[in-house]
Amino acid sequence: MRGQISLSRKLFTTFNALFLTGVTLLGIVPFLHLLSISLSSNTAAMAGEVKLWPVGFSWDAYIYLGEKVEFFRALWVSLERVALGTVVNMLLVFLTAYPLAKSNEQFGSRTVYVWFFAVTMFFGGGLIPTFMVVKNTGLIDSIWALILPGALSVWNVILMLNFFRSIPKELEEAATIDGAGHWTILWRVFLPVSLPSIATIGLFTIVGHWNSWFDGILYLNSPDKYPLQTYLSTLIMSMNSMMTSVSVEQLKVLENLSEKTLKTAQIFMGALPIMLVYPFLQKYFVRGMTVGSVKE
């Protein structure tokens, strides 16, 4: 027979539910407001009448956006950056975390390398030296300028090596007895049991590449090569400049289109891919963050 729930427990549960609902709304409401503005008429958007529901419903911003070559070109660059950057970042994290997860008996210089990487989390070379390195290596105005300067995240390495250290040593010893080398142990023993941590680090990497915008301004000279977030950050255009770049057929669309509705439509479309990916990785997120944090 279940015991009666105390009043304090009911109050605590109610408070938790209200608090978490409030936090959820804080995350959802800005996107609803953004979407509502993008779907509203020019007059309502410019007058600030739009809250959480479109006023004077209009698809004009998305119709015009569908014809903007620059937006989809920037979107493709971002997708290319995320794909290449995630592969490079994850590969380097695996190859760095695996030896650092060994004991000092197995890897005598482990402590030296751990301190070497840890120092980079607190001290950096600075913006100008980093730019000079990228320039002198010939990466300026290429997709690799957005990937290689931050190819190895020490924070992700720490998360990964802590997960590796939590894997039972018996698995590695059994593989070694069967004749497996370090490469085989990493790819066929460690990584298959590390999916929660891999999903967590992968999510960090994907979001980091997708949201990054400043390095595009810094390292890319051609606006045609800008990733989406850099393109959106430099999207300060007036209706006059828009009118000079559109065809006669688009003039009717622009009659009910404003700079505000167009910007919000592009920002919403820029955030949509990450919002669609996150729910599939979220179930691994908490587990990947906490696993390995408690040692027995």
Image: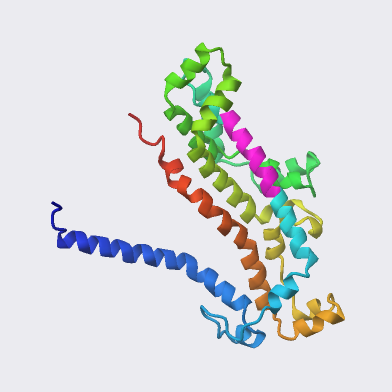
Report x, y in % for residue 150: 64, 42
For image coordinates 65% across by 81% down, the residue present is: 58
Highlighted magenta segment, given as a residue range:
81-96
* Whole-percent x, y for residue 47 in the image: 60, 87
Q: In which quadrant is the C terminus drawn?
A: top left
6 vs 177: above or below: below
**Residue at 38%, 65% in the rendered image:** 21
Residue 54 x/y as whole percent:
57, 81
Residue 21 visible in the current orientation:
yes
Q: Is residue 89 magenta?
A: yes
Query: Residue visible at 17% across and 61% down?
Result: 8
| Whether residue 151 is visible | no
Seen from the viewer's position, the closer of residues 84 and 119 is 84
Magenta span has 85? yes
Instruction: Give the side of residue 32 with respect to residue 287, left or right.
Output: right
Assign the magenta stretch its main secondary structure. Answer: helix
In this view, which residue lies farthest toward the right? 248
